[in-house]
């Protein structure tokens, strides 16, 4: 590729081609055929894409948002999102505000709760659309091809813990449709080759391929002329639109005597660059010009590349401990950066990508730990994040330099960019490429460590560029070199969400991404926002309340044993044990204690609570022993099945319990009719046992279904434990008349016992 031409050469070409282009333009659209120039553009075709609708949820963490993943085809000139929302027709359904986020290349990074992000996290403001009506739309001109993501959610939740299926809720269904209009005939703009164009009523679509190691691109319009004026009424749009940040370049040309050109430093590599030219001359006017694209290339100097090809794996691993050569000038590169007439623009360090797990990658330079940084050219490392499955994590970059290896008046400046590296450190430190804003970093003797976190990086090749700078005395940097240690990772969650969060892997069809679910009042992207966090004393108090409140089950256990209800006592002991250790495992931070898998403990806790209620109600029914134990077993099996289907559904527990209540009431009514007396017959039983037990059970159900929130959970749920155990102690029936509290309790003088079977009136001596 040839370097950029001078301004004199460009003016000469413009004068040479202006006259023939103007003659061709006047003959293109005569007055009689002016209407043909305004026909619809046949170069455009439309396509529509849709995805299955999803039920929206009130926002509490990132998993509450519903994610949609689309792919925009190449050469798309118009993208239209159609956003449709439907809701139930019940009385509880009202119009609520729905927030929809848009982002190119990765899922949107959102913050509806206005929480803080971890330190050194770089976050761009999200592009969002709030919907107050049922439908909305959004148009994007010249969108970037590739992955586009939408995320939608309802307003922030009230933190109320609702029992699934107990309270009627309103379902809000969201479905986005993507309509695209793309060009099927695009003119290829070859480097340094003028391409004549005539603009009528429709724009002209061009594209030029940008190969790797392109330092800059210059686009120029030459010989521009109009058939109705002497001006050059052309608007040039270069690049593709992305969200949330849009760096698309727009150039408006007006004067035919002045050069109309656009210079793009560090353009995106290995892709087509879209160029759209539109006439501003009016409906009947025509404009002719020649488009020229000039690409300036540079040669990369690959550090130890030949050594890597010739060395064995063992030699490569041993070379990782050796220092790199101090400068390429000692091998084949002079201080002017040229070899054989070529130009070196960067020092390229090969990087090894090591996939460790889902959304978990480690990057490290080949055969070395440190990266050589000098002042003559940037040192560049390429991080391959373009697999399509890397945008669901967080890119963490850590750099460190030895304090003694860097002078006081020097610094190492770095820039992290996508699509192409930043190479213009000598001209500017804004860390901006042609179509994106990078992430700047710096190292110095006073600040030898620099860290950067990029949540949900775009699907692309990322580049880390470093260069040694001496702003006060540039001559001191000519022979200086610094070794910078880099630690580069792609992780699902930063620090695994810390001690007060849980890193959860989320899925949308085949796309995986991660998010943090926080506990104990901690909030934020990485559960690092402690503005509403519980103190250590509050966490210990919550853990003690939730675990020790289960000791109230000792009362129904003792009463059951005293009344020979051994199965009931076993069930209460099972419930007390697993509820205690489940809540000990459910605590954040240092208060956590897990003796089994968390999911196993939760399942056993839910199962024990349901079966406890089941056996208590059936025990009150006073069934025959055989029938009672059969129902005990069947109920336990039904609970095990229903909780496996959905352990959060209210009716999975309430259904069997209501059946048990029907059985109990039926038996009580039967006894009332048979004895012609109210059952239970004793008023003391009603006043001192049944009414307090029923009252405690009623209050427990009310607390469990309507009063629990994430803020008061630790004491309301503890009250639920105590009320549930206390109601069981009050509601357990007394022992049968003429039966001793313990089986086989009558001891004879010869150390034998008499045991009685009350149902069969059989006696035995043991």
Image (tube, rainbow, N blue to C red):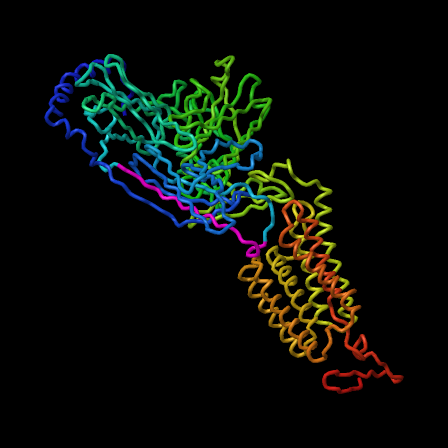
Point 74% across, 60% down: residue: 726
- The percent coordinates of residue 524 (x first, y second) are 57, 38
Point 13% across, 21% down: residue: 26
Residue 500 occupies quadrant: top right
Give whichever of 266, 233 is nearer the camera: 233
Give whichever of 594, 467 is nearer the camera: 594
**Quarter of the figure that contains the C terminus:** bottom right
Which residue is situated farthest in the right direction here? 749
Q: Answer with left or right where residue 330 lies relative to residue 28.
A: right
Q: Is residue 169 magenta?
A: yes
- The percent coordinates of residue 511 (x first, y second) are 43, 47
Task: Please count the marks in the image.
Answer: 0
Q: Does 474 sit above or below residue 616?
A: above
Point 29% across, 24% down: residue: 236
Give whichever of 306, 22 is nearer the camera: 22
Q: Does 55 sit above or below residue 286?
A: below
Q: Answer with left or right where residue 17 lies relative to residue 144.
A: left
Q: Is residue 491 magenta?
A: no
- The percent coordinates of residue 147 (x first, y second) are 38, 40
- The percent coordinates of residue 148 (x first, y second) are 39, 39
Residue 340 shows up from this direction: yes
Range drawn in magenta: 163-182
Q: Does 759 sit above or below residue 268?
A: below
Which residue is situated farthest in the front direction here? 676
Residue 318 shows up from this direction: no
Point 19% across, 25% down: residue: 198
Give whichever of 228, 433 is nearer the camera: 228
**Quarter of the figure that contains the N terminus:** top left
Q: Answer with left or right where residue 747 lies relative to residue 149.
A: right
């Amino acid at each position: 590729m040839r370097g950029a031409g001078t301004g004199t050469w460009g003016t000469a070409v413009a004068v040479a081609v202006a006259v023939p282009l103007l003659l061709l333009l006047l003959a293109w659209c005569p007055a009689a055929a002016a209407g043909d120039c305004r026909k619809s553009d046949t170069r455009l075709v439309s396509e529509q894409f849709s995805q299955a609708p999803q039920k929206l949820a009130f926002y509490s963490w990132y998993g509450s948002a519903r994610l949609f993943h689309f792919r925009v085809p190449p050469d798309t000139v118009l993208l239209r999102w159609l956003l449709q929302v439907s809701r139930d027709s019940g009385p509880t359904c009202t119009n609520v505000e729905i927030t929809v986020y848009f982002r190119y290349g990765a899922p949107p990074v959102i913050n509806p709760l206005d929480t803080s992000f971890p330190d050194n996290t770089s976050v761009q403001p999200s592009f969002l659309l709030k919907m107050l009506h049922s439908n909305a739309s959004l148009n994007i001109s010249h969108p970037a091809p590739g992955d586009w993501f939408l995320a939608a959610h309802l307003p922030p939740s009230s933190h109320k813990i609702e029992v699934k299926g107990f309270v009627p809720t309103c379902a809000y269904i969201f479905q986005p449709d993507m309509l695209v209009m793309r060009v099927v005939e695009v003119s290829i703009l070859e480097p340094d080759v003028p391409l004549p164009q005539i603009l009528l009523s429709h724009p002209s679509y061009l594209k030029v391929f940008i190969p790797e190691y392109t330092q800059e691109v210059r686009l120029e319009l030459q010989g521009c002329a109009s058939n109705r004026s002497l001006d050059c009424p052309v608007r040039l749009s270069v690049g593709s639109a992305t969200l949330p940040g849009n760096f698309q370049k727009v150039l408006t040309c007006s004067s035919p005597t002045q050069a109309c050109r656009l210079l793009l430093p560090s353009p995106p590599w290995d892709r087509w660059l879209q160029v759209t030219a539109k006439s501003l001359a009016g409906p009947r006017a025509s404009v002719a010009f020649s488009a020229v694209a000039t690409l300036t290339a540079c040669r990369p100097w690959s550090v130890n590349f030949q050594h890597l090809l010739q060395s064995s794996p063992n030699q490569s691993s041993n070379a990782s401990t050796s220092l790199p050569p101090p400068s390429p000038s000692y091998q084949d590169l002079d201080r002017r950066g040229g070899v054989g007439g070529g130009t070196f623009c960067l020092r390229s360090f090969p990087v090894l990508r090591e996939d460790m797990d889902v959304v978990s990658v480690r990057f490290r330079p080949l055969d070395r730990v440190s990266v050589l940084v000098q002042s003559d050219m940037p040192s560049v490392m390429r991080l391959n994040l373009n697999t399509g499955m890397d945008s669901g994590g967080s890119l963490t970059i850590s750099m460190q330099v030895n304090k003694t290896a860097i002078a006081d008046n020097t610094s190492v400046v770095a820039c992290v960019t996508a699509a192409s590296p930043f190479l213009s450190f000598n001209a500017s430190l804004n860390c901006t490429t042609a179509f994106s804003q990078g992430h700047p970093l710096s190292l110095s003797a006073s600040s030898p460590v620099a860290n950067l976190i990029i949540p949900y990086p775009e699907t692309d090749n990322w580049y880390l560029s470093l260069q040694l700078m001496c702003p006060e005395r540039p001559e001191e940097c000519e022979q200086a070199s610094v070794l910078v240690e880099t630690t580069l990772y792609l992780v699902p969650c930063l620090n695994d969400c810390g001690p007060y969060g849980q890193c959860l892997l989320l899925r949308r069809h085949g796309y995986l991404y991660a998010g943090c679910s926080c506990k104990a009042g901690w909030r934020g992207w990485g559960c690092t926002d402690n503005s509403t966090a519980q103190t250590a004393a509050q966490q210990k108090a919550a853990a003690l309340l939730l675990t020790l409140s289960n000791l109230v089950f000792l009362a129904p256990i003792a009463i059951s044993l005293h009344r020979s209800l051994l199965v009931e006592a076993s069930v209460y002991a099972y419930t007390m044990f697993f509820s205690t250790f489940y809540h000990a495992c459910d605590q954040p931070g240092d208060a956590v204690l897990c003796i089994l898998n968390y999911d196993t403990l939760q399942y056993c806790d839910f199962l024990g609570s349901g079966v406890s209620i089941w056996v208590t109600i059936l025990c009150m029914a006073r069934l025959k022993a055989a029938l009672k134990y059969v129902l005990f077993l069947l109920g336990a099996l039904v609970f095990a099945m229903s909780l496996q289907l959905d352990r959060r559904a209210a009716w999975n527990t309430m259904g069997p319990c209501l059946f048990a209540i029907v059985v109990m009431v039926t038996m009580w009514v039967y006894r009332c009719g048979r004895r012609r007396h109210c059952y239970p017959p004793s008023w003391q039983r009603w006043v001192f046992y049944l009414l307090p037990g029923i009252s405690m059970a009623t209050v427990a159900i009310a607390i469990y279904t309507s009063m629990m929130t994430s803020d008061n959970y630790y004491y309301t749920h503890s009250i639920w434990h105590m009320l549930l155990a206390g109601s069981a102690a009050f509601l357990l029936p007394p022992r049968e008349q003429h039966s001793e509290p313990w089986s086989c309790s009558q001891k004879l003088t010869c150390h034998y016992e008499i045991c009685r079977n009350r149902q069969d009136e059989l006696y035995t001596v043991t």
